[in-house]
Structures are given as structure tokens and as C-alpha cells.
Image (cartoon, helix red, strand yellow):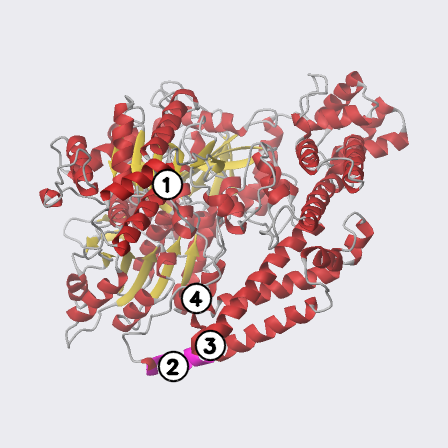
Amino acid sequence: MNNIGKSERESQNRIIQLFKNELKYTYLGNWEEQTRAQPVEEKLLLDFLINTQGYSTIVANKAVQELVKVATNISIGLYDANKEVYKLLRYGVSVREELGEQKERAWFINWKEPQKNNFAIAEEVTVSGQYSKRPDIVIYVNGIALGIIELKNSRKGVEWGIRQNLDNQKPMFIQKFFTTMQYVLAGNDTQGLRYGTIETTEKYYLQWKEEADKKFDYAIDKHLYLMCQKERFLELIHDFVVFDKGTKKLCRPNQFFGIKAAHNNVHTKQGGIIWHTQGSGKSLTMVWLTKWIRENIDNSRILIITDREELDDQIEKLFLGVEENIYRTKSGKDLISKLNNTSPWLMASLVHKFGRNSEEGDFEGYIEELKKSLSSDFRAKGNIYVFVDECHRTQSGKLHDAMKLLLPDALFIGFTGTPLLKKDKQKSIEVFGPYIGEPYKFDEAVADGVVLDLLYEARDVEQFVTDQQSIDDWFDAETKGLTDSAKVDLKRKWGTMQKVLGSKSRLEKIVFDIVKDFKIKPRLSTGEGNAMLVSSSVYNACKYYELFQNAGFKECAIITSYNPHHGDTKGEETGESTPTEKLLKYEVYQRMLNGKTTEDFEQLAKTQFIKEPAKMKLLIVVDKLLTGFDAPSATYLYIDKSMQDHGLFQAICRVNRVDNEDKEYGYIVDYKDLFKSLQRSITDYTSGAFDEYDLDDVKGLLSDRYEVSKDRLESALETVIALCEPVHPQDEPSFIRYFCGNTENPDDIRETEERRVTLYKSVVALIRAYANIANEMHKIGYTEQEAEKIKKQVQFYSDLRETIKQASGDYVDLKRFEPGMRQLMDMYLDAKSSKKISDFENKSLVDLIVHVSEPTEPYGNKRSQEAVAETIENNVRKVIIEESQTNPKYYEKMSILLYELIKQRKEETIAYQEYLEKIKQLAGNVSNPMGTTEYPTTLNSPAKRALFDNLDEDEILALALDNVIKSNKLDGWRDGGLKEKKLRIAINEIIKDDNRTEELMHIVKAQNEY
């Protein structure tokens, strides 16, 4: 029997059986004919308190009366009523049996022994209100409604269930029924389950992610099975709920499993690193872990260390928002004093800047101040846990080791939202310990809808000299009285100014560019979104601000670490019409602040930026706000500053926060070409962690590491050299022939695969071995010349690996080239210098075509041209081979075109530039078949076009078959069993040819939309 489009009643019956049979919940019945006015079943709760918990009848009755009184007090608003109920559920209620007797704490839920509670469900629960409502399923624990489920049939999206839950929470419906509610759920059989809590807006409903120990036909069954197991359900409520400044929040799966893993680390006293990508709730993870440690570890104290003021502010506001008082230490001396006492239990310490003109803290100055503040009787009190926020910035180990001397018994946990660079990873693990739980990476967060994907666009504003002779004449005239050395210094400074600051003309072009975007780009033009501009210096930021003001673009502000002071102007007046750098900054800031203090102005600007984006359209920044600043309205990030690594990753994540439905992506506009030309450094950070201390304490650890590291490096280098020894001459085409064979022959590619895989693994082992010891080569016995030679060898083999991957086609993963999307995170981690062989408009193909290392020979060299051409052709061929199953006819045509193009190139009947243009066009058609306009307009999807191509271009038949497939496919139909057989029968009823149906089934299986 076909159950496509079945009613939600069938789903509800199945889910009720799941609760009864799998989860062992009691079924209370169908309550459609009964009417309820409150979410507490008093008889059930009394029975639990008296017969299971063992309280007297008087105590039980008083406890129930208190809970009901709080649960029915909706006059204070749903959020506050729910919050008060939660306190009673979590911490119990104190009642006195008789006047004069001692108070007794009554617990409504036995948190320590979950199985001793009464778990139950009821369906069709009719609740009275101004307009009565009937939720599909209500989850009760000891008679208290803690969960509610709205189900929809497969034809209606899960969002309808979410909206129904939101409607039910309005005062005109059954708002009072939600005062005890912890989990508010909605789902259907096709999309699975979504969960939120009271007043959770639709965009913030979440989906659980976890593998189950048994198979389920429907995702919603799996999700309910995992989330509603008795122990899990109570744990989620007890340890993973927070009331944060007017918003009740639940944990995401990554937070739950990260914190659970951290519990084990706390028990085993092992440090580590929690890596949850930017925007995925890392700060709340810190809050939940802090609360758990406080409640479960005797005499526990938590110290949170940050190195930026905005992070320190953010953490304070976060903890105050969840009603936890956090003490912000005022100095290193203050921190030492507080650690030497037994309170406060929760502290934050900022690694102060100590007068440095930088947003990042001065770790050395901070450590020095701590050492100076130590008294002879210092001994930290309590079980101390140290959380280091943004721990990637301290991976050299200095802060960790200094704190370890102060707090030898403390457990250190690092938190980061950015990936650890490959060269840093080993050292970071040495410092903090291994990852705690699974890292929650950027691509996972995008797939889960936790953050938005980022789209990247490079814009070049080229500067050129219009009149070099006039510049030379000016220098001659103005520098007559200077020595030759001074003239050289001045010209060098001029070159630096050109490079770093940029001409006014260039900045004007960028300003015009951004103002134009605000008129035409989505969200910017409507005032729902806004942007940030990252400038290379405070001086440039001020010049930008003036240009925006002159262009009539008034809704912008500068936010930097600069704080104007009248002393800045002293000695700066030259009598010239153009002010000096210091004067310009001072004057621009004074006009912008307009009498306000810098702090007050910045606070107002940030508040408007977040809450009223139309009134504050653009923030011009340098370093400040590039970490710890969450503004969902921020949609575009314009970069006009050289950045790299963690700083760059954190900056671009300012625009990845989820906002309204019209914000589909965050946009990165790059005026510095950072991503394409980013060179990967293979040196290590300076390791000076022990410079100030007695090396005897750590000598054993370090000497062992040096010895092992040297052996590992030399062994890895010998392996790679031996692997490449048979290649003669050692140039690019020879290496390609040796490791790939004839790249036009798939058999050669297959036969040489093992050789290539060995190369890839060996080079990776070499890079890792070198990265671990790169900046300590002198410590393990290498001379400067030997170290430089090894560095060049590692670079050479690293480039060779990339070249062979490109030439063989091993590099390309088609899923990265979906139309309109870029996996920016992957591109960032894999970025290498690339040669520009043509201006490819389809930016998603840049990696596909040109992602190879710079050639050592001139680019115009014919042998290099041949190597590049073979690499491009092989990549396109790989795309054709891998995609051919989705549309055999189309890709057969593309294969023929590629063959003809290769033939023309080899026979030299086509110029190289013309070849590049044609291969570019072919690559576009291969990667994006939907880009062609050669199909009838009704064929508006890849699947319809595939059917059309493979049904002898019969438009009517293709559309009919598409409709049959969509109407008959069951959930999980690619099972090789009955579901797949049913679809095959339905297709054959149209095609009426068994062999052709079998061919079409292979094509249908390859379509993502079916």
C-alpha cells in the first residue's frame, strides 16, 4: 500500500508506540475529551512525592501548591514565569510541615536517579484558553509537562509545526500551559525533528545530530529516541538550559558532546582544547561547563583569561546575564591577591596591553607583573580550573607555563573558535592537551545552519604612477639640503607609504565602491543589513571616514583602540596645508565624537549597528571588534588590510551570524587579494616559554622531543628524496610523467596511483616533521646553512605534491564547486600561491583551473605551458568522469569537445591564448551545466535536463517522468530493496522497456534532488 502523503495521525500512532515500547514511557491516554487549565497534573505529582520520594502528605501538598502557584502566575510574562518554575524544578522548594519545625527541601524531580521518576506521555491534550488548543503529544515527568510535540504530515514542512508552537504560546491561546515547558518540539516524517524552548524563534530551532545504536525508518523517530531517553532528557534539562538576558537557550549537539567530553577531562584531571567554530556558541559552552564544575567539584574555582577588552566585556556580560557574578580582576597584583584568598569563586583576568598600541594583550608584560606581585606566602586556594579564551593566540606556551608555575595544581582548558594551523597543532597539544571531544568545524556549522556560509569576492583597485618625472622633480627640490643617506631613507619611506597607506585616489575608489553596494546589494540597500570595513591603520580609517562623510554617507563610525588626547597635537604643526598623521587622527576623531567620550560614542555606535542597522550602516575598524563582536545584522566585510591566519579567520566570521531569512550568506569583499595570494609559512612560532625560568624543570621533556624530532625529520626527508631519485631530469614535466604517466590515459593514471599516494603521504610526513621543529633547528645541531637548505627542500617537495595532485586530477572534489557557493574555510586552509593564467569570470572554478604552485621557469616557457595545459585538461576530464553518471549524454558531448580541444593544442592548430579561452568556457559548462541556455525553459533543474538528454530530447516525456519519480519515491528509496523496486516499476510503466528503465534508474539515483 502506498503511504505517500499519509496523515500525521499515522505518524503520531507510530511515535506513541516508540515512547511506549522503546523508551518505556507510560501512556496516559487520549485527552481530547478532557480539558486542562494548567501544565501540572496534581494527582500524579502528589503520588510521586508521597509514594516514591517519601515526603509526608502535608509537605507534598504544600510543595505542589507552591509549584502550581508559580506555574499559573502568567502576569509576569512567559519568560519570567518559566524561569521561576525552572528554579523550583532544578533546586526544589523549601517547605515547613508545621509552624515552628525546620524547613524541608522537596524535590519535584529525582535528578540523581533518573529511572526513579515517572515518565509519561499523553496525546491530543486539550488545553483551555481564550481560544483552546490541542497539542499532539505532551511529555510529562512526575505529572509536570516538560515537553510538547507538534507533528505535521510529510507534505507540510516542519516549519508549520514550529509556527503552531509559537502561536500556542501567545496570550490569546494557551500561553499558561508553557510555564513548565523545557523542550518545544516539531517534526514530520520527511524532515525529522526540530527542537527549541519557549519563545524560540523559527530560525533558531535546532536539529539533533548523533548516531543511534539501532536503525529507524524515519529521522524523527531516531531524534526522539536519542533525546527522550530518560537519563538524557533529564540531563539536557538539568545541565544544558540557560536563561540569558530575556532569552531561554538550549544546547546544540556540538555543545552537549563537547561539554560531556570535558566532564571526563575534569574527572581525569587532563587539560585540552575545545574547538567550536566562530559563532557556534563557544561562550555558552564555557558557561555550562563552569556551572557543572561548580556543582560537581568540591571547593572549585574558575579563572577565565582573555587578551582583549571586548572579550573580557563579553564574558562579564554573559555571566551576569545568566545570574552568575564574575569578578574582573583589575591587575596582575589583584589577581594574585584573589587567588591567595578563598573567594571569589569565579574570576576573569585580562592580559593587559601595558601601553602597547595593540588590541592584543602583552603576554610578556602580564607575566612579568604576575611575578612581581608574588608574595612569599602565596598559595592559590581551592581546586582551580583555568579557561584560556581564544587559546590559539597563546600557542607558544608562554602564558600557560607562567600560569602553571603560579597554579601547579590547576587544570587548564583552552577554548578556540578558529582552526589551529597545522604548524601550531602539535605545540598547542603539548601546551594544553589534546582536543576535548570532536572539533566542531566551520563546514559542519554551515551544514547545520548554525552559521552562514561565506561568499568571497576579490576586487582590485590598482595604483599606478601618472607622472614619475614630477615626483622625481619634487624629491630633488625638497631634499637639496639632505645627505645622500637621508634621501635614500626618505625615498624608502615614500615607497612604504605608497604600499601601506595607498593614495587618496585609491581610497576614493573603494569608498565609491562601498557606497554603490549600499544602493544595490541585498540587505544593504534595504537597511536590514550593514557592513564593516577593515582598514590597515587608524590613519587610513580616519581618511576613509572623511571620504564617506564628503560623499554624503553619514551613517558610519570609526571604532579603534585610538583615544584622542590633546598631547597628540604637540609639536605636530608644520605650517603646511596638509596635516601630519597625528594631527589628522586627532582632528577627525574630535569632529566624529562631537563632545562625547570615546567610550560613550563607541557604545552608542555598536548598539545602533546591532539593533538599528539603518542608522549605523558601516563601522570602520582596524583590530577592534574583529573578535568577540556578534552582530547578526553584519552582512558584508570589506577588507583593505593585509591579514592572515587566525586574525583573518576571526575577521571574516564577523559576518557569518544567522539573522533574518533574507540573510543567506555573509559576504567578504577583499581589496588585498588575501586568499588567492596567501603564502603558507612553514616556520614555527618562537618557543620562549621557559626563558625566564629554571630549565632543569623542563629539560627532560625538551631534550627527548628534540632527539625524536631530528630523527623524524631526517628519516622523512630521506624517504622523499629516495622516492624521487628515479626522476631525470628533475623538472615539472618529468615528475608528472613519472608519477602520473600519460595524463590523457586513464589506465596510466590508475597504474601510477600507488606511487602518487606514497608521495603524498611521505611529503605530508616531511612537512609535519619539519613544522614541529622549524624554529628550533639550531637547538638540534643544524647550522644556519643546513637549516636553510632543509627549508628549501621541504618547500620544493611541498610544491611538488601540489603539482602532482593537480596534474593527476587527484586534487579536485566536485562538491566544492556547487554554483554560487564557496567553502571558504577549506579554501583558507588549503590556499597556496597560484599562477594566474586567465581571468576566469566563474570564480568557483579558480581552484579547479589554476590552483598550482608558481613555476620556477618563466611562465611563457613552452614546457611550462604544456604542463599547465595537461593539469587543466586532466582536472576537467576528472569532472566529466565523476559527473557522467548524472547525465551520460551531456558529459559524453563534453568529453568529445575536450578531446577535440586537446587535439588542436597538440597539433598546434590553435594559439595558446585562444586555447585558454576555450578551455575556460568548456570548464564552465562541465562544472555548471545549468549555466547553458540551450534547453527548453520548462527544464529548470539538473534532473529534468538529465532525463531530457537521455530520453532522446523528449521534453514531454522528461517532465512526465520527473513528476512520476517525485510522486512515487519513498523516504530512503535507494535501499536496493522494496522501495527502490516500487520506483522502478512506476518508471517502467511510463517507459515500457526494461533495459532502458534500468539505464534510467542509474541516472535517477545520481540526482541529488530525488
First of labels 4, 3 by sequence position: 4
First of labels 3, 2 by sequence position: 2
The amino acid type, in three-letter code, at marker 4 is Lys
Proximity of marks 3 and 1: CB atoms separated by less than 8 Å: no
Q: Name the quarter where the N terminus is drawn.
A: top right
858 and 367: which one is in front? Answer: 858
Q: Which residue is mark 1?
A: 249
Report the disc number at residue 699.
2
Between circles 4 and 3, the one closer to the viewer is 3
The amino acid type, in three-letter code, at marker 2 is Lys
Q: Which residue is mark 4?
A: 427
Q: Name the quarter where the C terminus is drawn.
A: top right
Magenta region = 696-706
First of labels 3, 1 by sequence position: 1
**Coordinates of residue 572 in the picture (x, y in percent):** 13, 43
In the rendered view, tell whether residue 236 sits above or below residue 3.
Answer: below
Element type where label 1 sits in the image: strand
Between circles 3 and 1, the one closer to the viewer is 3
Element type where label 3 sits in the image: loop
Report the disc number at residue 389.
none
Element type where label 2 sits in the image: helix
Q: Residue at x 35, y 47 (%)?
A: 284
Report the disc number at residue 783.
3
First of labels 1, 4 by sequence position: 1
**Coordinates of residue 325 in the picture (x, y in percent):** 21, 51
**Coordinates of residue 940 in the picture (x, y in percent):** 67, 21
The amino acid type, in three-letter code, at marker 3 is Thr
